[in-house]
Amino acid sequence: MAGRIRLWSGYVLFFYVVTHLLNHALGLISLRVLEAGRIWFVFIWHNPIGQVALYGALLAHFCLALWSLYRRRTLQLSRWEWGQWILGASIVPLGTIHVIGTRLAYELYNVESGYPWVLGSLLASDWTVVARQFSLPLVVWLHACIGLHFAWRLRPWYRPWLPVLYAFALLVPVAGIAGAGIALRDVAELAQRPGFLDELFARARAPTAAQIATLYAIANALEFTALGLLVALILAHPVRTLWQRRAGVVHLSYGERRTASHATGLTVLEMSRIAGIPHASVCGGRGRCSTCRVRMGGEDRAKLPPASTEEQKVLSRVGAPANVRLACQLRPPPGHYRVTPLLPPSTGPVEAYRRQPQAHGGEHYVAILFADIRGFTSISEGKLPYDVVFLLNRYFRATGQAIEAAGGRVDKFIGDGVMAIFGLTSEPRTACRQALDA
Ligand code: HEM
Ligand code: HEM
Ligand code: FES
């Protein structure tokens, strides 16, 4: 559920950024068109629904990002996960003053927080503020694109649409940043005229020096709170591990004398990663791809908690039997378990949606029928090879038809013998009856 809300809040924020950057792109035409285009931006976002959606999504996304950090017991992340985390965390120091200086400045001091105010205040600041403002769209865009790529690459429609999405991912930020840059240059040219900036600030009802100091203080307080939360979560990590060690230890055995033991609370995937056991995890442990699925056995397997609705949905999608679980979602209680990863570590996104019910393995009662031709050796001794093949082919056709008609499945032919399985889709009692019928 948390993963889903984080994704949907990411969609809302992404839509906001797209509309914002498209608005900036109008700066490529003229300052007048840039400010006129803001009408659409204001229409979408400056109403109670837009504001609740935007700031609700921002708050939810931030809290759920922290929650996902708290839930992770190991910081052994893949390169793209590190990238997404670092970019996501940099959005806070890069973007807080921008949001406070526009939205909150309007709420507190009735500042007309449109392009004249933002561009004018950028001109009046030093280059670090400008660099910060212009790196914000890049960082946000990269962060969102990594997230969307890894969320969407599992979907069957993603590959055919990739060229269009690439074009979109390139054009929107380039046009947005170029538009904002050209608008800033245009305002800088106009500012050569004496008194232009004073006039601009007066029309935008710019905040006083004391009010600006208050806005900076609020932004700093928010940034420090975010940093404090991040540090607290990282520090909570060893404390929680100590606490959980008292609750008991989980022992996993992977066969071939590979084992992993850890205090309870970790997912099977996290334990595999800590023990250096390679494991497929296309979606990075978000419970979406199913490639981390494992067959669970061992003496304590009855203690395993049942799969959540979300996990069950993903498992049903690939037709997994009851003893198969998602390694990234399963947190076993203390005990001894046997883990068999079902897909090779090199598995790619294509396998994520493939239904392979037989490939999972599993325990199943079946009836097996073996039959061969009585006295086949003496029959074949006096015959030409061609005649023997003819005889065998007729025999295989007859036995195959009889087995299929009775509800069984031919497994293999061995010389003159046939091996058939009954009961793949029926009860053991019926399976035996079917084998006798055949
Ligand atoms: C992708 C990075 C950016 C993000 C996430 C972002 C975010 C925001 C947010 C949350 C607001 C407050 C909106 C509101 O009033 O509710 C805002 C306002 C604004 N931003 Fe950005 N911004 C970004 C980049 C930029 C850049 C590069 C510029 C141009 C120099 C810019 C110009 C403005 C302007 C003019 C406003 C006031 C808009 C209005 O109230 O209608 N933003 N931005
Ligand atoms: C306008 C800003 C933002 C946009 C458009 C955005 C977009 C996204 C998207 C689309 C995802 C993928 C969602 C998923 O796979 O569940 C994501 C994930 C993530 N976002 Fe953001 N995000 C923004 C701001 C932030 C901020 C401020 C943070 C602060 C820490 C952040 C941290 C994260 C993290 C850590 C993840 C990955 C979580 C995980 O690995 O489980 N994001 N973001
Ligand atoms: S890693 Fe994708 S579902 Fe577990």
Image (cartoon, rainbow, N blue to C red):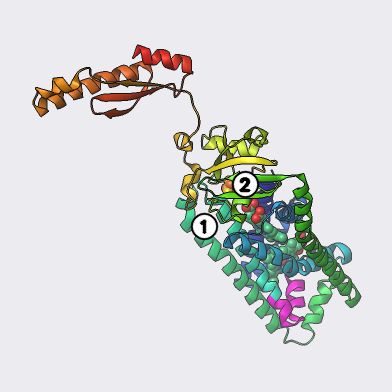
* Looking at the image, residue 404 lies above or below residue 77: above
Residue 172 sits in quarter: bottom right
Residue behind mark 2: 268
Q: What stretch of residues is rendered in magenta?
A: 112-131
Q: Is residue 293 left or right of residue 121?
A: left
Secondary-structure class at tag 1: helix
Magenta-drawn stretch, dominant element (helix, strand or loop): helix
Specify the amino acid type for callout 2. Answer: Val
Residue 51 visible at all: no
Gap between marks 2 and 1 measured at Cα: 35 Å
Q: Which residue is under mark 1?
A: 165
Compared with 244, 196 (above or below) is below
Please say if the residues under marks 2 and 1 sit with CB atoms less than 8 Å apart. no
Where's residue 137, x and y in %? 65, 67
The number of callouts visible is 2
Query: Regarding mark 2 in the picture, which secondary structure is present there?
Result: helix
Q: Tell me if mark 2 has few (under 14), some (14-19) or many (20+) residues whose alpha carbon lies within 10 angstroms of its own.
A: many
Q: Nearer the viewer, mark 2 or mark 1?
A: 2
Q: Residue 218 in the image: x percent, y percent?
A: 86, 67
For label 1, the crowd category at 10 Å Cα-Cα, with few meaning under 14, some 14 to 19 and many 20 or more, is some
* Location of residue 415 by image quarter: top left
- Earlier sequence position, callout 2 versus callout 1: 1
Indicate whether residue 194 is drawn in magenta: no
Q: Which quarter of the figure is the N terminus placed in? A: top right
Quadrant location of the C terminus in the rendered image: top left
